[in-house]
Image (tube, grey):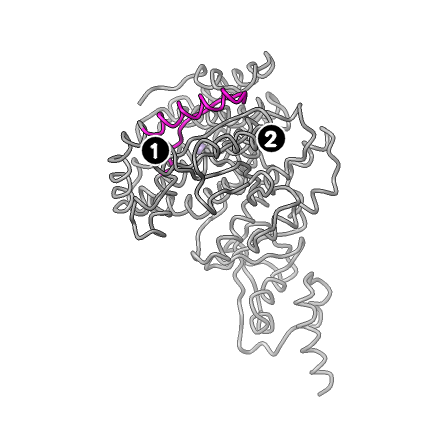
Amino acid sequence: MKQLGLEDILKVLKKSPSEQRKKIITEAYEFSKKAHEGQKRKSGEEYFQHSIATARTLAEIGMGGKTIAAGLLHDVDEDTPVTLEEIEAKFGKEVAFMVDGVTKLGKIKLRGSHEEYFLENLRKMFLAMAADIRVVIIKLADRLHNMQTLDHLPPDKQQRIARETMEIFAPIANRLGIGEIKTQLQDLSFKYLDSENYNYVKEIITKSYKERERYVNQAIRELEKELKKEGIEVLDIHGRAKSLYSSYEKLKKYDMDINRIYDLSAVRLIVPEIADCYEALGIVHKKYRPMVGRIKDYISLPKPNGYQSIHTTIFGPEGRILEVQIRTQKMHDEAEFGIAAHWIYSDKMKKSWKEYIFGSKKETMDKELKWVKQLREWQNEIGRDDEEFIEGLKIDFFKNHIFAFTPKGDIIDLPEEATPVDFAYAIHSEVGNSTVGAKADGKMVPLDYHIHNGQVLEIITSKDRKGPNPDWLKFVKTSMAKSAIRKVTRKENQQ
Ligand code: MN
C-alpha cells in the first residue's frame, strides 16, 4: 500500500487554505508522527498511517484546520505516552477537547440487541456523548480507515466491527448528510456481513458497467449540447454509479432483476442557481420524454437529512431509460459532505448547521426522527452569529441526560444525578421494590450514588426485601421512582 504523507492531506484541502491552517496541520503532523514512532498496526503498517488517513478524509470533506489536527492526534492520548495536557499546551483547548472526545467515544460499547429501538438509542447516546459534532465526524473518518483495513483482523472481529459500522456509524453518517462517508461505510460492511450477495451484486453490476458507461457518456454529450443551446450555464455534468449496497437494497425490492432498476447509473447536472435547476429540468423534458410519476422535487421538499436535488427519469438517447439529477453546487457539496459542507460555506452563509442536518421547516418528519426534531427546536432558540455557531456545535441537548447500561447492554436513559434506585425502577417496579444493593462497573456503590454516563449498572435484588425504603425519596431523581415508592409506602400506611 502507498505510504501517505503530509502532502496527501495538504493537497485535498478545500478552498485556498491560509498559512495558519497549513501551520497547525503541519505541526500536528510532526507531533503525532513522533508520538506514534515505532508503533505498528495489525497489518504491519506504521501506526501513524492510520492517523494520516483519518486526517485526509477530514480534509476531503472540507473540515477546518483544528479538526484535521485533532484527526492527526486522535489516537495520541490513548495509545502513546503523550498526555492530553501536552496536546492542550501545544494546540490549545479546542483541539485537546476534540481528541479527548474521540478517546471517550471509543470506550462506549456499541453492542447489544439488533432491535431498531435499541440501535436508535445507541445512535442517540453516541451523539450525546460526543458533545461536539466535530468529534463525531472525526470518529466517522477514523472508522472509515479501520473498515478499509479490516482484512487484517480475525473473522469474529471483522463481523463485530462490520455490524457495528452498518448499524450505528453508517446511519449516523447518513443523518449528518455525509453521503460520501455513508456510502463507503455501507459498501465495506456489506462485503464482510454478506459476502455472498456482495459478490453477486458486484458481478452483475460490473458486467453491465462498460456498456452503461458508454451510454451515460453519450447522454451527457447530448444533454450538454442542448443545455448550452438554451443558454444554461453547466458548471459540471457527470455520470454517477449507484453504490453496491444501495443497488442491492433496490434489487431486493425488484426480485433481484437488474433490468427493472433505472438508476444504476445516472447523469448528474450541476448548475449555478435554483432557478436554473427548474429551467434545466424543462429543457431535459423537452428533449427527452419523462417517465410519469418519476419526477421528484427534493428542492422544494428536501429529504429529512437535508438532501436537495431534482430527480427525473427520462427516455433518453436510443429510447433507453435514464435518471437525471439536477442540483446547484451548494446542494451537491451538502449531499456529499453534509454538515461538513458548512465549513466550506460558513463565511458566505448565516444558516444554522442544524438546518443542514435536520432539513428545512417544510419537510415532514419521520417518527424515528422525532428526537432530531426535538434537538432542532431546541437549537432554533440559540442565535446564529459566528460565536454562537461554534457554541451551537456542542450537543447540549443531552446535557441533562445520562445513559447507563444494564449488564445485558440495554440502555437506560436517566436525568443527571440519577441513582441506582432510579435505574432499578426504570427497569421495572418489581426490581425497584426489591433492590438491596448496586454495582457500577463491577464495584459496589451506595444506593444514593450518582450514576455516570456510560456506566454499566447491576442491581442486586432480594426476595426478602419487603418493598422500598421511604428514605429513598430523599435522593431519587425520576418521577417514575418517586411515584412507585410513594405508592407502596402509602399502601403500607393504610394497612
Ligand atoms: Mn483511530
Q: Position of residue 140 (x, y in %)?
A: 48, 36
Give yes or no for residue 78 being in the magenta stretch.
Answer: no
From the viewer's perspective, is residue 413 above or below residue 218? below
Mark 1 vs 2, N-terminal side: 1
| Outermost residue toward the top in this view | 19
Span highlighted in magenta in the image: 215-243
Judge by depth and name the residue closer to the eye, 442 or 412.
412
Crowding at dot 1, Cα within 10 Å, few <14 / some 14-19 / many 20+, comes out as some
Q: Position of residue 305 (x, y in %)?
A: 55, 42
Q: In the figure, residue 101 lies in which quadrant? A: top right
Q: Amino acid at mark 1?
A: Thr
Name the quarter where the N terminus is drawn.
Answer: top left
Q: Amino acid at mark 2?
A: Ile
Q: Secondary structure at mark 1?
A: loop
* Left or right position of 19 against 79: right
Tell me which residue sits at (29%, 32%) in the image. 209
Q: Please name the residue that numbered disc 2 is placed on.
A: 274
Tell me which residue sits at (30%, 53%) in the image. 255
Q: Please name the residue that numbered disc 1 is placed on.
A: 149
Give yes or no for residue 233 being in the magenta stretch.
Answer: yes
From the viewer's perspective, is residue 461 above or below residue 340? below
- How far apart marks 1 and 2 lie (CA) works out to 41 Å
**Residue 340 showing in the rendered view:** no
Q: Position of residue 360 (x, y in %)?
A: 64, 42
